[in-house]
Amino acid sequence: MPERRTIGQILMSFGRISEEDVERALEYQRDHGGYFGEALLACGFVSQDELEWGLASQFDLPYIFPDADSIDPEAASLVSPEWALAHLTLPIMRTDEVLTVVVDSPIKTAAVDELQARTDLRIELALASAGKIRELIRQVFARATAAEEDQRPVPTRLADAFGKALEAASNRFGISTRGHRSWVWWDDSGTIRRRPLDGMWEADLGQLLRPDPREQVVGQVRAAWEGELNREGMITPVEVRYLADESGHEYLFRPLQEASRLQERFPPPSPGVMSEIRMLARSGSARFVVTTEPGDLGHEILPHLPTLLLDPSWRSIYINAEEQDAAHEAFSLQMPKDPQQWASELETLRAFHFDVVTVDLTGNQADWAGSALDVASVAFLLWPMDEDRRPAYDAGIRWELHIAAKEGDALEWTLEPLQG
């Protein structure tokens, strides 16, 4: 068998780098460590796409640019969205004996071995960029959810549909009618969800929205106003717009909630990161270590993460051991000064069944991390950058959300699997 060429030899053979570039990259690698390909990137000799193409050539793998329409749904359904995101690995085609899997690295043997053992199929790899695979995972699983919804066109109550829209932190949702048909829709991180409405929706809307929309639109073809949606005591201010003609009418609702004001103070993550966090939250796997640069940013932003990232109507509690300046901005509980009492205090909170908990505690994390996670199914634990992540991993946390302050009040958000 011929000896496998190095990534440097491959890129040199295609004229992308020179021998001088190789020497400078090797010198960088000696000083900073890491892989040779990472040194090439750091020195600016190649782009990320060129490096990934070179890796594919080195391992004799196809370098692909897949789109969601070309993915075999049966193959993708072999894994959960959480597993796919955690491993950046997605099955894209299946035959009787072979499963084709797209990965971002040709040396991801653990994930591939797990798939092979689970399916008893021969695995063939294809390579794509990490960003492309993330986007592909979001699109494939969002499309699968939409397809499931289309197969169950059961009329729904308006209150239930509005609840789903607000739980998805939708920035716009509405009601459409054409003749005798009526349906509700909402924007779920770029995917439009739709549900047919039952015959009582107009009466329900009058109960849910104040002022009563029927008083605002009578005799009108266009109207706009601000109101409040009241879902069993949970108030959401909304902007309402209305259009009508002889064939039907449209309502458009845009929440005017705390998240809008908070987003001016804390710019939110990209739609991709936001979509992944919400996907994990809906699946029940949303347990995060939160690290920040600078460290003080964590104390400021942590209590607001449920509002910024999820539905503000989710019941959340902020737990801190010292009187933090942000404690008065969220429903919060200050723990006793004696850390020996923390476990019993956290145990007491379990009975309240909160949706989200944000935790800003110090000391030996192994003593309280597990108890804190029992408070709610969605948890954000502030973790110092220089602290060992092992206690978090041992407690069952599998994701790290990193937030870094940039110039001009911008924030950079990254979501990565937590390394044990």
Image (cartoon, rainbow, N blue to C red):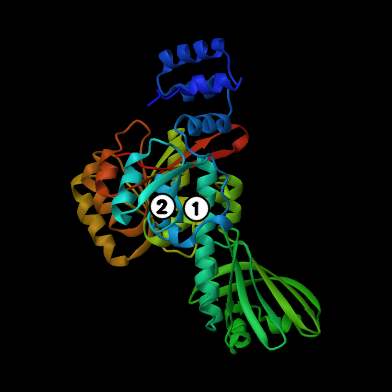
The quadrant of the rendering that contains the C terminus is: top left
Q: Quadrant of residue 119?
A: bottom left
Q: Earlier in the sequence, mark 2 or mark 1?
A: 2
Which residue sits at x=52%, y=61%?
A: 142
Q: Give the percent coordinates (x, y) of residue 192.
A: 60, 66
Q: Is residue 407 above or below residue 417?
A: above
Comparing 390 with 63, the one in front is 63
Q: Give the percent coordinates (x, y) of residue 120.
A: 30, 54
Q: Nearer the viewer, mark 2 or mark 1?
A: 2
Query: What is the number of the mark on residue 137?
Result: 1
The quadrant of the rendering that contains the N terminus is: top left
Q: Give the percent coordinates (x, y) of residue 147.
A: 53, 69
Q: Return the residue found at the far front.
A: 1
Helix, strand or loop at label 1? It is helix
> Disc 2 marks which amino acid?
Leu
Name the residue beneath numbered marker 2: 99
Q: Is residue 66 above or below residue 2?
A: below
- The answer to whether residue 168 of the structure is visible from this angle is no
Helix, strand or loop at label 2? It is strand
> Disc 1 marks which amino acid?
Ile
